[in-house]
Image: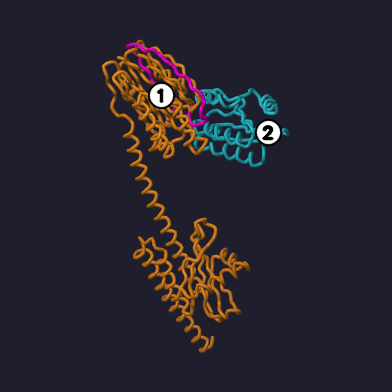
Amino acid sequence: MTDENKKESSQHLIEMNRWLIHGLDILSELTKTFQADLRDTEDLTQIYQVSEKALRKVLLDLNHVSFLGLEEDDINMELVYSMPKDHTETILNIIEEYTDNGTFGWALCENRLVIVPDKKRNKTILFHVLATHNQVLGMFVGITTLDIFVSDAAKKLISVILLDTAHSIESIALTKDLKASERMRQEVESAAKIQASLLPKDALDQDQLIALGHCLPSDQIGGDYYDFFSPSEELVNLAICDISGHGVPAGLFMTMVRSIIRTMGHSKSPPLKVIHYLNGFLGGEIPDPEIFVTGIYSQFHKPTKTLTYVTAGHPAPWLINHKGQTKRLPAKGLAMGIVPDIPYEEHQVVLKSGDTVLFFTDGLYELKKDDGIMLGEEGLELVIQKIDWTSPQKGVKQLFEEMNLLKQQDDQTVLVLKIK
Amino acid sequence: MDLKIDRKILDSNIAVIKLAGEMDISSANLLKAEIKNLLAEEVLHIVLDLADLEFTDSVGIGAIVAGLTRTNESGGRLCAVAPSRPVKRLMDIVGLFQILDCFDTVQEAEKSLLS
């Protein structure tokens, strides 16, 4: 190697070294800005400004910098940053032209700087996809002079800057999602508390009877509902409902059902009228044909100890006598909200002292045992027969203790009427 | 157990959807989508073969009700065939047999739909 060559080679190494230090400085500043100064920002423009500044340090002749971001449909792109602004029209024309001739689409698939000489404009157009390892987030489009030379080191540096930019954009989106999800969690928690407060907590203990209920939702917000209240000295109304599905939609319908039952119940409407009205109302209100409501509305007349009830697609209640013998009460009728004006049947049963009527939702027997087999109605009957119902409070507690041993799939609700 | 769905279109332009396994909130959408697709393909009547459906919850029943409503709206009929014991019991409790015809075999269902 001649002295001249040695000198040239040494100059080249010095130049390379200077470039590396310059590049490391740019990256170090960029990382610091993204990870510290802009860590909590939700403003994408700030990210693009920092990125632009870094790109201009690498390519001194960069006339224009613009970024395209994905639209809400995650398919199309729109211009989200353009600097200087008075070049925006030109950049939009360039994007349109290069989209039409396929260059834009091709550049999108290349994870590197794509340099396109544009003799018509006497410029060089630069494209670089804005993507993390997980997803494409947009595209960088730059305009520079026609005869620009971009070294391999500069190209790599630009790729790293744009990868960092993409990571920052992704991080902002994730932070936004996390915040929205936290807000949603808090709202669901509040809704669950409100919903729980709509169910009677204390037993209704009167001289002739005790009424009580318990609900164990499988989600924070459930679709089950029970209620009992006395609209007069002689009457006690009892209701149990199950809205198909669970979660927020079912919870919203539950509050609607409760309002109707409370309003009609306090005006002493007979069960047949309540169920008819609920069916017609829900048929008109439920936007989705797959949502329906099953339920039993009953009225206990104290002087005659007669329980009048109407069932709508709901499991028949169990009557447990003072000896602990069980019997299913008759129940027939289509679930509410499916067919308006369908006829329902009213049933009556005269209760005796010591009788317990157990209303429940299907979540109580749609439970899987260890062997994967469903408990079923027969299994539930065996559990009910094992329990001493002398004290309905203790009975309900014991019932849920037994159920707790099985895998819950749906909301579980019981409503008990005990005749003293 | 997952829900398995098979479909067959008979020469009479009646579709038979065979459900097997368990249908619940996580899988009921598959049935809804299948019915929607069949109606879009201008199938008139739909038969749900429920012999191998071992379990459905209320969301699954909701999907059947939604299918029934949509088939009726398109001028056709939807009926069920041979539901297994637990499925039949739930359909009975919900009162579904008041609005849904149920047959022992696909042939019987086809004969009724064509009559």
A374 with respect to A40 (left or right): right
Q: Which chain is orange?
A: A
| Image location of residue A136, percent across then percent down | 51, 60
Residue type at mark 1 is Tyr
| Image location of residue B42, percent across then percent down | 67, 40
A387 with respect to A329 (left or right): left
Residue occupying the point 39% across, 51% down: A180
| Residue placed most toward the observer, A339 or B32 | A339
* Relative vertical location of residue A168 with respect to residue A239 in this rendering, above or below: below
Q: Which mark is residue A111?
A: none
Q: Quadrant of the C terminus of chain A?
A: top left
Residue linked to disc 1: A297
Residue linked to disc 2: B14
| Residue interval drawn in magenta | A336-362
Q: Quadrant of residue A356?
A: top left
Residue occupying the point 63% across, 68% down: A101
Q: Quadrant of residue A235?
A: top left
Q: Quadrant of residue A127?
A: bottom right
Alpha-carbon span between mark 1 and mark 2 = 40 Å
* Relative vertical location of residue B104 with respect to residue A20 in this rendering, above or below: above
Chain B visual colour: cyan
Look at discs 1 and 2 and give the one toward the viewer. Answer: 1
